[in-house]
Amino acid sequence: MNIVILGCGRVGSTFARMMHRDGHSVTVIDIQSEAFRRLGAKFRGNRIVGNGIDEDVLKRAGIETADVFIAATQGDNRNIMAAQIAQRVFKVERVIARIYDPVRADRYRQLGIVTLCTTTIASGLLRDFVTTNEWGLDKDYSAEYLRLNV
């Protein structure tokens, strides 16, 4: 697979290393060149310095031939914008955006963007472990959050 990842923080860099190790073509975009140090010396994928909501930067990263686009920056707004551009402008087949705000994650999910809301996932896992002493790894915590009627 050809994978483009926006954000070289803890999640983006770990995912990039995993997918590169598994033999996939990986390009990572980050606004700060120092972030690429997280990739380590063995990472042979591409590194692009730039803003992931800039179409020219996305083109340099190979978005036009990407099978997967992951938006994993620290900012919900940037992740959503980049995901929408990847999905609607460049027609990337599989687009996922990490969103911290559960309400926003649900709204964008309803608009057809696959979202990963680490806030609801972590909260659900913690609750399950505290109450049952087991991790509920097979649950959809995003759906459960919606039942809270927030």
Image (cartoon, rainbow, N blue to C red):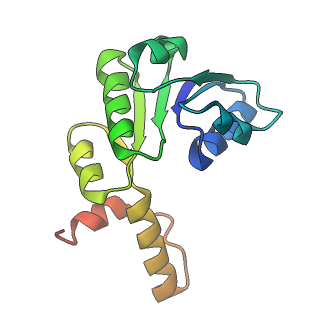
Residue 131: x percent and y percent?
A: 46, 87
- Would residue 55 be visible to someone looking at this image? yes
Residue 133: x percent and y percent?
A: 55, 85
Q: Residue at x 50, y 12 (%)?
A: 65
In this rendering, the answer to whether 39 lies above or below 24 is below
Q: Nearer the viewer, residue 106 or 41?
A: 41
- Would residue 1 be visible to someone looking at this image? no
Task: Count numbered badges in the picture.
Answer: 0
Q: Residue at x 83, y 34 (%)?
A: 41
Q: Considering the image in quadrants, where does the N terminus appear?
A: top right
Kindly indicate the quadrant of the structure image that contains residue 141.
bottom left
Residue 70: x percent and y percent?
A: 48, 35
Q: In this image, 132 relative to 86: left or right? A: right
Farthest residue, direction right:
41
Q: In this image, 144 relative to 131: left or right? A: left
Residue 69: x percent and y percent?
A: 47, 29
Q: Residue at x 39, y 15 (%)?
A: 55
Kindly indicate the quadrant of the structure image that contains residue 39.
top right
Q: Considering the image in quadrants, where does the C terminus appear?
A: bottom left
In this rendering, the answer to whether 10 lies above or below 48 is below
